Image (spheres, coloured by chain):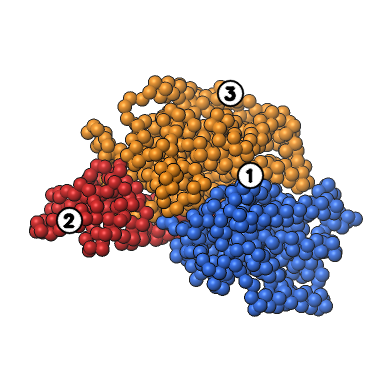
Amino acid sequence: MNKYITAYYMDEEDLMKGLRQMKAKGLKISDVLTPFPVHGIDKVLEIPRSRLTRVGFIAGAVGAAVAFGFQAWVFTIDYPLNFGGKPFFSVPSFIPVTFELTVLFAAFAMVIAFLITNKLSPGAKPLIHDERCTDDRFLVVVKVDDDSSDESISQIKLALAEAGAEGILLKA
Amino acid sequence: MENQTFILTKKLSTITFVMIAIGLLTLGASYFAGVGLDRIAANLLLNTYYFLAIGLIGLFIVAVHTIAESGWHTSIQRIGEAMSTFIPVAGLLLLILFVSGGLHLIYDWTHKDHLDEILLKKVAYLNEPFFYIRFLVYFIIWISLAYFIRKNSKQLDQFGDLKYFRKLRIFSAIFVVTLALTSVTSAWDWLMSIDAHWFSTLYGWYVFSSMLASGTAVLIIILFMLKQMGYMDHVNHEHIHDLGKYLFGFSIFWAYLWFSQYMLIWYANIPEETIYFYERHKNFSTIFYVNLILNFIVPFLALMTRNSKRGSLILLPVALIVFIGHWLDLYQLIMPGAVGGENAGIGLPEIGITIGYAGLFLLVVFRSLTKAPLVPKNHPFFKESFEYHTQY
Amino acid sequence: MYTSPLREPLIRGNKNYKQVTDDILAPMAGTPSIYWYIGISIAGLGLLFGAWATYITVFYGIGEWGTNKTVGWAWDITNFVWWVGIGHAGTFISAILLLFRQKWRTSINRSAEAMTLIAVMCAGFFPLIHMGRLLLGFFIFPYPNTRLLWVNFNSPLLWDVFAISTYFLVSLIFWYVGLIPDLGTVRDRAKTKIRKAIYGFLSFGWTGSARHWSRHETVSLILAGLAAPLVLSVHTIVSFDFATSVIPGWHTTIFPPYFVSGAVFSGFAMVLTLMIISRKALNLEDYITVNHIESMNKIIILTGSIVGIAYLTEFFMAWYSGVEFETYAFFNRAFGPYAWAYWIMMTCNVITPQLFWFKKIRRSVLFTFIISIFVNIGMWFERFVIVVTSLHRDYLPSSWTMYRPTIVEVGLYVGTFGLFFTLFLLFIRVFPVIAIAEVKGVLKSSGEKTKTTGHE
């Protein structure tokens, strides 16, 4: 069971200033909860650029291959039928469906990957530190081990206070 | 923000003059070597139109960003303005080409005594007096608006009065609206009427999308040239990223229109319409596919990732490829009708004359770049552009 | 990020983050107003009318319609294209305007996207009902079956199946991904246990973690990148339904971009109609300002003018082509028995939007409302003109005829209106109508406080 120390800011510019100070002091920030994406926070928290785009690219390529391959197979091998004198392997005709399935595969794969990597799912029960994080508070969360001493906890609290954070709380 | 004024060095202007000389020499040599006059005339039309369109797109990009109140673009608007100074030069060259007999070499409908039943129906539109009237109308509109936009932009920088900004917006709006009409009809006049029997409602927009892509490519190329020479320090990765996105987007848009036009004609299979692509499949089949590869597949795959759009490493070669690709696209619009499968080809005349035109274009653009500070510091959105950074 | 002082604020009234949340969530709280009940009752009546018409059509067949051997497609396809067109604005706003970094989109994208989804549902109803046997609708999907048959991938009608269903599904997930953070907000402010449980379930456990936000931004951006060409493709493929044929007036290469432009045009008009009512009814005038209306009106001029140029191009080419059937089709449109429909279309689509060149009109809420309705009407007539006038006088003069709708067809159309407004009114009660997190994201750079204090 982990313990958390939380503290909040009421403005994203104060938050960014505070985060830089905490980082300079070597405080390990576990997470920051914000009501909207804060510009530049990725750099301070060293969050790597998301690789979800690759999932999208691969799934899109698969979608294109499946759609084109399937149509070509149906019309040249499985059931060649003459429609309006068009050739059986009529590439221009296959493009619209190929395009649509490319987009469909890429979009769904990306969203599913997004939900999985974020551990988001219908009915997930997240730990809600502060209900106002989705409203107007910018919450800094620091994880502390169960057996960490009171001294280190108060040090973290002090660092948070020095960085101008409000409402410092220790939660079990 | 040093190096605010562009200085045309001796070396640079010599290079452009050498290029122009190569063009003139090839032109003369092709004439005396017995290259068909129709092929020479078609080449001149191809290059004049190509660089004219690039100039128009330069101005179009400036105008659109002005009326859309875009902030980021302010940093690079001088390049687009400079590109527009080629419009009058191209107008003059085109007029000389047409008056000196090029018109009869290129356009079948000018042979009044040999018109067939279908062409006779079109005489009300396709006749020489009306053709020249339209020609003059186009160039009067384009040249005057290019002049006013450049003038107000310069004055805005000099005096910093918002009055000029408002004027700039009005002229830009007029230019965008008139270009929307004239770009379509001029493409009919100069390009579609080469194959006078054939028609396609999408044609004007298709040509415009092609020019949009090549104009953006040239803008990117000139920007990197200037950066190489030590100018345009205020342009950062974000601006380049946006231009890269444009090149990516316009290439896809071009492919979309190409497909729409081709697919509908292929699908409906009406002989009067399919003959256009039949000719291109039969005698120009390599160019037919190369066109798609250079203008769609290359930019689509190469510019897909974020990093490729943010620096010169990939973006510059792709811009060059797109520039060549749309030249080829224009080639396959003009040559099958104007020269025909047997006589057309891509050889020394094509390459030499294009080099000449490129030299002339660069000379005109560089000359006009020297006339205004590269950094429009007093533009009301300049600060937004200068401090430009974004998350994506 | 620096914003030029020339730019007008997008959020009025010196809001702070809490006020933004409160204002936007206000319409969801408490009991609905009397107007809401009146609205949903009228919509319900429309829905009932539609249900009756559906019953008649399914039981007695499409012989109950005014369509005949010559005019085989009429109101149903007109309504289908019209609704799909309206469904283009939402994804255009969220995808293409996101790519162009238009900040004003944040106040309108949520409800416009909801409108898109509902409009696509209304649209999908028409081809289904035209099949006659509603229960066999699944035949349009390629699945291994005992008949050993595949669908015809050469047919534009089948491309439509893929285009519309992909568009619906991708728009749905795009909309929902954007909705997740806001549903988290609703959950965290819920007073009752049931509400908390429901929104807790719907919000997928969103907490607002910086890592989640980082991925959320990536996913939104790439979905926008995917949705942008998707928007273009949908109406392109709808236009292929007509343009791949050899019917004069239908087969013309300009159709794809011209249909897309018309779709965005009509979609924005519908968004304006709805927004002008809802900003008033829901007290959101600080968020959907005159500035927003003006920006949308500029898109109306742009797309309206593109449509206008396309009309002129088509008309000119009909003559220039020298094809007598083509020439006659256009002559018949403008001066034949359906000329009234053609001139309604021309007036509403080409002339009225040009009034927006005047800044006064562009910024007048009343004028915008009126013109937006004109555009809606005009775009409906555009499809009617394309479908009916091209068909009713075909190559064979002996089968020339007229078309007139029956009460059943009217019922189906009114029914989709009922569906549209019922679902939209439910939407504003159940979900936040404005993207709360996105508005907060631009509050600093585009709120009023920044503007007055010059704060960067």
**Residue B344 seen anywhere in this rendered image of the structure:** yes
Q: Residues within 10 Å of mark 2 (few under 14, many from 20)?
A: some
Q: Is residue C451 left or right of residue B156?
A: left
Q: Earlier in the sequence, mark 3 or mark 1?
A: 1
Image quarter for residue B288? bottom right
Q: Find residue C355 and report its horizontal and vertical position in percent.
A: 63, 35
Spot the orange chain and give its letter: C
Alpha carbon separation for disc pair 3 and 2: 78 Å
Q: Find residue A122 and report its horizontal and vertical position in percent.
A: 28, 44
The label nearer to you, 2 versus 1, is 2
Residue for point 26% across, 42% down: A132
Spot the red chain and give its letter: A
Alpha carbon separation for disc pair 2 and 1: 63 Å
Q: Amino acid at mark 1?
A: Ile
Residue for point 59% across, 49% down: B162
Spot the blue chain and give its letter: B
Q: Find residue B7 and report its horizontal and vertical position in percent.
A: 62, 71
Q: Residue furthest right?
A: B113
Image quarter for residue B45? bottom right
Q: Find residue A159 and report its horizontal and vertical position in percent.
A: 20, 57
Q: Is residue B252 above or below residue C318?
A: below
* In front of the other: B112 or C212: C212
Label 2 near label 3: C-beta < 8 Å? Answer: no
Q: Are marks 3 and 2 on the same chain?
A: no
Tag 2 secondary structure: helix
Residue for point 53% across, 53% down: B381
Q: Amino acid at mark 3?
A: Thr
Instruction: Determine the chain carrying the residue at label 1.
Output: C
- Residue denoted by label 3: C406
Q: Is residue B143 above or below residue C364?
A: below
